[in-house]
Amino acid sequence: MAVVVSIDHSLENEISQVFELQKKRAIQLRSAPLRDRISLLNNLEKWILNNRNAIQDAIFDDYRKPIEESGFSEIFPVVSEIRHVKKNLKRWTSDKKIDTPLFLFGSSATIKHEPKGVCLIIAPWNYPFMLLMNPLISAIAAGNTAILKPSEITPKTSALMKKMVSELFEKNEICLFEGGLTTSKFLLSLPFDHIFFTGSTAVGKIVMKAAAENLATVTLELGGKSPTIVDETANIKKSAERIAWGKLINTGQSCIAPDYILVHEKVKHQLVNELKKQINKMYGKGCDQYKHALSFGRIVNENHFVRVQKLTDDAIQKGAKVICSGENDKRTRFISPTILTQVTADMEIMKEEIFGPILPIIEYKHLDEVVDFINERPKALALYVFSKCKKNQEKILLNTSSGTFSINETMVHFSHQNLPFGGINHSGIGKAHGYHGFMSFTNEKSVLKQWSPISASKFLYPPFTHFKKKILDLMIKYF
């Protein structure tokens, strides 16, 4: 008999009550002074800086993420985002004057940046602090209220963030609810004005369906398989260094990690050898040292460990060759950095996002093969190209589609505050970070003001005389 798990009714009631409180508060916030938003951001920044060690410890306790790594991948992006927002918020929120066409003489037009209202932010486990806080910063900047739902897979971090939110915010403005699937389902049933979700494509589809029931707008930060292309002109040492770092940070559990490599046959062996050198340089020589390296984390839980292991086993059974690997440890959820060659498209590892420290490599002869291979698959969140040839760079840029595109680098585009971050189609909808994150939580309200006693629209009123017909003919011809 199947066991049906339902949400606790007291929690359901509490969520509903908070939602109603936030609806009322959201209306008040439309006319609240900008300094109130800045004050909230200042308090958030101060709390994070004062509790930096506690945040890093919680993330380490959840899945042994190295302290230094959480410092630059969880803490720094958040405080940097707060400072960037505070610096630019007055300009972003200012009414934007718009030129008025001549046939609407006597009127003026502006765009007003209006908060969307009550927002839902659902965050994943792989960057549990940063991927909840950064959308929250954008929501606050735009003047919204928000309900937050962190991942249950990282309970220590979620509990710490709940403590932080309860200390910093009133429930009618910002509130965090812990819980699993049933909590998420109940939250998605509520008529939010905007939903910001970060997670898998499969769950993203569920979120979008739920949002459609209430015609809520969505920002979906999803994932997928991000290709990495290395052509015959690339600086192999630099390419290997940047690919190895981008692949193995957070133990490969990053939505924009290089998922697989397409390498020109002339430089394949050189690249593989250099990747091995770079992995050894970063984490020690061989599996035993990788296991004890303080800079190398763990897979988040046993389910994900088993999933990644199955992908690797399937590839090996179908003919993939293991170039760099070691003995994995299910008890500690350790998976050794692994390079696979002779990989083919029919292997399971090429059909789903890996989200682990496994790097498949496929060689090619002609760049057209690469373009076709990428275009036959869902659009990626990130696409990386390593090449000195501008012609090759441009060919891939113009003939493929992806959420982001980086040349001779991996991952760091995420930290560029003036670049929109997000996917396209299967890899996401909408953009985040800086101004683009602010706009995701903002309604651009068009405002037209008729200041002249004579309105152009009067010439369109019935009855439609011969004179008015002439006016219409002139409008069609000249305007």
Image (cartoon, rainbow, N blue to C red):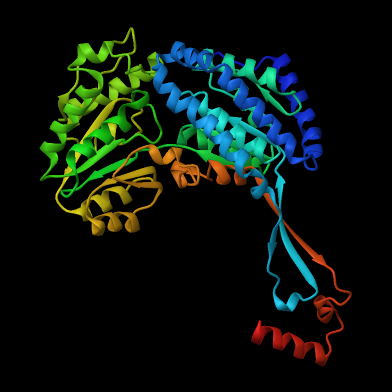
Name the side, left or right, on which 171 lies relative to 157: right
Residue 122 appears anywhere in the view? yes
Q: Nearer the viewer, residue 306 or 381?
A: 381
Name the residue rendered at 26%, 12% in the picture: 291
Name the residue rendered at 44%, 27% in the picture: 73
Name the side, left or right, on which 89 lies relative to 464: left
Q: Nearer the viewer, residue 128 or 234?
A: 234
Q: Quadrant of residue 122?
A: top right
Compared with residue 344, is residue 150 higher up or lower down, i.e. above or below?
Answer: above
Compared with residue 238, is residue 283 higher up or lower down, i.e. above or below?
Answer: above
Counting from the top left corner in percent of width and height, residue 43 is at 66, 25
Counting from the top left corner in percent of width and height, residue 208 is at 57, 40
Name the residue rendered at 70%, 84% in the picture: 475
Compared with residue 378, is residue 445 higher up or lower down, i.e. above or below?
Answer: below
Counting from the top left corner in percent of width and height, residue 415 is at 45, 38
Compared with residue 378, is residue 186 higher up or lower down, i.e. above or below?
Answer: above
Q: Nearer the viewer, residue 451 or 35?
A: 35
Name the side, left or right, on which 114 lies relative to 434: right
Counting from the top left corner in percent of width and height, residue 222 is at 47, 37
